[in-house]
Image: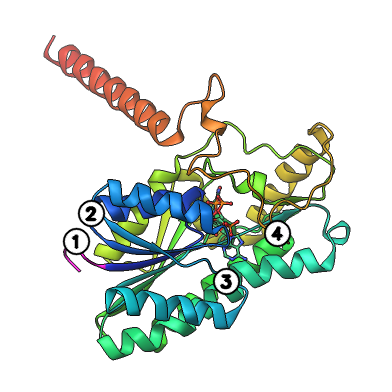
Amino acid sequence: MTDLSHASVVITGASSGIGRATARAFAQRGARLTLAARRGDVLEEAARECRALGGDAVVAPTDVTDPEAVRALARAAQDRWGRIDVWVNNAGVGAVGRFDAVPLDLHRQVIEVNLMGALYGAHAVIPVFRRQGAGVLVNNVSMGAWAPMPFAAAYTASKFGLRGLAASLRQELAEHPRIHVCGVFPSMIDTPGIQHGANLSGRNVDPGPYLYAPERVAEAIVGVALHPRAEVAVGFPAGWARFGYGVAPLPTEAAIGFVARRAMDRASRAPLREGALRHPIPDGTHASGGWLDRPGTVEAGRANTVVLGAAALGLGALALSLARRRRA
Ligand code: NDP
């Protein structure tokens, strides 16, 4: 695809966080969106935002754990826009806590949304892509699919599973040169995701200071829709997780485990909560989760640019002084 103007794009989990930023990014390029999540009123707001940005949008309140609802979502997009060019499996939830302290139904919900929801999405849209002879399926995976996160066992299992699902589909569809299965693997992103997640750890979950803006992931998703790639990391930590787990899985796993256990031990106490897993909650309707508004926090992408810029200047100055010394 060379142009997203009038492209029909379906996004699940479009009411907040990365999904909402992604809807905006496609809308800015004139796409026709079908926005899905459970909170219909919040989706209406997102759709208005997309229209104001130059795109067009309809909403389709959908619970992605219901395969029939996901099929209906695909039908709604086709009925409204006549085709589906891009399908973004983005809806996702997490449950933090000691594995055996998290009730089984919450573990199950994490797998149902993150893995089964994406599988239902793929199952609904691939026949459409086959009929059209073209289409891009984008899964919002996570760096957690490259490096296992302790205290988030179902989340890790769902994202490892999603990566495998995508790889398998990619090979199955390899003989269709215009059908693509892509994945983006974000690092930690400033979204309402932690607010929406369940926390059964009894400890405060803080994403820390090294956070990327959701717009970075949105641009990566738009990027693979235009120029499909199998797997794209968003942010340094995701790239390192991929590299570390690729070359030395057990030491990487042990290092992550050590850091996570230490962070959990040191975190302040917090009440138990189930977030938006069983039912949607009204809080958290923006792309950002507000974490980057905390004083002293700099967006990681911007911080990297400053550090790389300073390093380039330092190297330049060093080269200049060496050249001068040699001339002298
Ligand atoms: P948000 O909580 O802001 O977004 C999650 C979205 O999923 C919401 O729109 C929510 O809307 C929707 N959703 C939840 N449950 C369901 C359901 N059963 N059916 C349909 N929609 C549902 O968090 P993020 O933006 O952070 O998360 C988006 C994706 O990004 C997830 O897949 C997550 O794993 C991934 N990710 C996030 C990272 C981060 O650091 N934030 C890092 C790596 C990956 P509603 O409640 O209205 O249904």
Pointer 1 or 2: first along the chain: 1
Q: In which quadrant will I find the N terminus?
A: bottom left
Mark 3 C-beta closer than 8 Å to ligand 1: yes
Query: Does the rendering let one see residue 42?
Result: yes
Mark 3–mark 1 CB contact (< 8 Å): no
Q: Name which quarter of the figure residue 251 lies in.
A: bottom right
Q: Secondary structure at mark 4?
A: loop
Residue 277 is marked as 4
Give the magenta range: 1-7
Please tell me whether residue 212 is drawn above or below residue 89 in the rendered image: above
Alpha-carbon distance for marks 4 and 2? 32 Å
Please tell me whether residue 183 is drawn above or below residue 236 in the rendered image: below
Kindly identify which residue carries mark 1. Answer: 5
Q: Amino acid at mark 1?
A: Ser
Q: Secondary structure at mark 2?
A: loop
Mark 1–mark 2 CB contact (< 8 Å): yes
Alpha-carbon distance for marks 3 and 2? 26 Å
> Which residue is drawn at the image coordinates 45% and 54% (left, top)?
44
Between 38 and 22, which is closer to the camera in this rendering? 38
Q: Amino acid at mark 2?
A: Arg
Alpha-carbon distance for marks 1 and 2? 6 Å
> Which residue is drawn at the image coordinates 55% and 39% (left, top)?
289
Kindly identify which residue carries mark 2. Answer: 29
Mark 4 C-beta closer than 8 Å to ligand 1: yes
Kindly identify which residue carries mark 3. Answer: 64
Q: Amino acid at mark 3?
A: Val
Q: Amino acid at mark 4?
A: Leu
The quarter of the image that holds ligand 1 is: bottom right
Q: In which quadrant will I find the C terminus?
A: top left
Pointer 3 or 1: first along the chain: 1
